[in-house]
Image: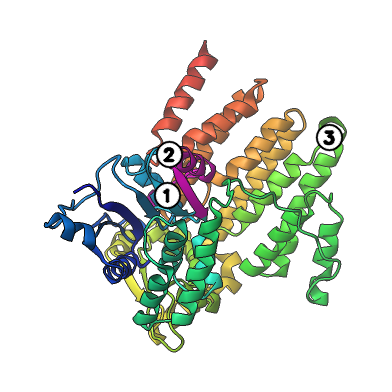
Amino acid sequence: MAERPIKLTIAALGGQGGGVLADWLVEIAESDGYIVQSTSVPGVAQRTGATIYYMEFFPRAAAERAGREPVMALMPVSGDVDCVLASELAEAGRAIQRGLVTPDRTTLISSTHRAYAIGEKSAMGQGAVDTEQLVDLVRSHAKRLVLFDMEETAERNGSVISSVLLGALCGSGVLPFRKQTFEQEIRKSGIAVKANLAAFEDACQRSQRGDSGFTGKAQPRLPQAVPAQARTPALQPLLDRVRQLPAAVQPVVLEGVRRTIDYQDPAYAALFLDRVQRIGALEARQNAVVGSHALLEATARSLALWMTFEDTIRVADLKTRASRFVRVREEIRADPGQIFGITEFMKPRVEEIAGTLPAGLGRWLLDSPRLCGWLTRWTGGKQIRSGTVGGFLMLHALGGCKRWRRSTLRFKQENARIEGWLGRIEQLAAHNYSLAVQLARAQNLVKGYGATHERGWRNFSLLVEQLEFLASRSDGAALLSRLQDAALADEEGQALAREIAELQASAAS
């Protein structure tokens, strides 16, 4: 046979309609007189499972002239694919890694949005793959590229991403099928026809225009305007205090005020502002020398996060908010009136239980090995269905305990740690401003709850132990930043231990 099959690969995540798209293409090809073969290979359960669909298309008329059926492959071969459809940017990168995208042959059609992998989400630091690097990668490997945010296109048209991928494929001209055949297949499905056709047409036109020029670079965010009036008169004094601070840091401090009010109450936000103003007054004395507000901004940002630490009360509160149920409904695309359920997997430790109790009672519990051992038998994995009356009321009652949060053991522990951290920042700022700034930023090690929080606090404490030595060095801030990166490199703390050992060896010499 003189002609060769057209070879196409679809890389899609679970729930994105990759199978529906493949079925559509089978029907479209057969309607336009083509023989088609389709196979699929499910991947591992990363980001709800990634599946590779491989398809080959061959003109039936050519097969009849040759007097025999074409021989088609079951799996794609590196360097032998005409078109790759990727429902997400990292999947495009994976296709390139497998050798399925080549600059002399392959048209790559990909969405620019990201669905983060488990490893990216669970990283202790910034674990997300650099989008700009991914975009540079796909641009350097494809013969032709169609690149735009297909998830946004689908949502804008009230459709799903499979319809957008189909439209982008049609507009690219890779397949020799009539546009009317594509549209007819969508109509035949009988599901959300109007929305799917709108998304199809939108994507088809964008594909015909080619690469969208997307660079992967984050657009610079304009400073948020701080309003002159608060939502209620009771909050106006807090807003007035925010507006007294330097304009450059007002947006960050305002978000901190909003966060602390949501976490606790206006009085807690006032405490947040008291602490910010302490650093602001300190920096005002230093500003003639350093000429910036780096310390104030870094401290305000970290302080807002630390003061809203995740205790069991906060977790329960967030899990029972109406906005969460709305978000879940939107994410799973549940129809109006459709019933869905949420199961919370929780594994509270004795430390979390003690931390929620009044400080004296919590300390007494932790000081009793017998009680701790008895409670440990009841702290295994728990499954609570927050969509049921019983499960919701249990979590809602726990979340409502925030009115007594100030008396809990965990609150008093964190409050003491915050004051110690602020005190060290004040001590350093007088003679080593850059090191004080880096110490303010190092708070990002202390996050989460349970074992995650425990590891973060341990690593943060190890960094604080090095401050005396670092303060004597001109490169102390750079060294502290390096230690911070090492602390975020692995959960076991091996990288941090190596860095500290090298630091101590250099101090000894």
Foreground tag (2 vs 3): 2
The alpha-carbon separation of the residues under discs 1 and 2 comes to: 9 Å
Determine the residue located farthest toward the front in the rendered image.
Answer: 65
**Who is closer to the viewer here, 430 or 366?**
430
Q: Position of residue 151 (x, y in %)?
A: 49, 64
Would you say residue 124 sits in the magenta stretch? yes
Residue occupied by mark 2: 141
Q: Position of residue 491 (x, y in %)?
A: 40, 42
Q: Earlier in the sequence, mark 1 or mark 3?
A: 1
Q: Earlier in the sequence, mark 2 or mark 3?
A: 2
**Who is closer to the viewer here, 250 or 443?**
250
* Residue plotted at (53% across, 79% down): 322
User: Callout 2: helix, strand or loop?
Assistant: helix
The residue stretch that appears in magenta: 118-147
On residue 291, which mark appears? Answer: 3
Amino acid type, callout 2: His
On residue 205, which mark appears? Answer: none
Q: Is residue 124 visible?
A: no
* Contact check, label 1 and label 2, Cβ < 8 Å: yes
Residue 260 falls in which quadrant of the image? bottom right
Residue occupied by mark 1: 108
Amino acid type, callout 1: Leu
Amino acid type, callout 3: Gly
Q: Position of residue 276 (x, y in %)?
A: 75, 51
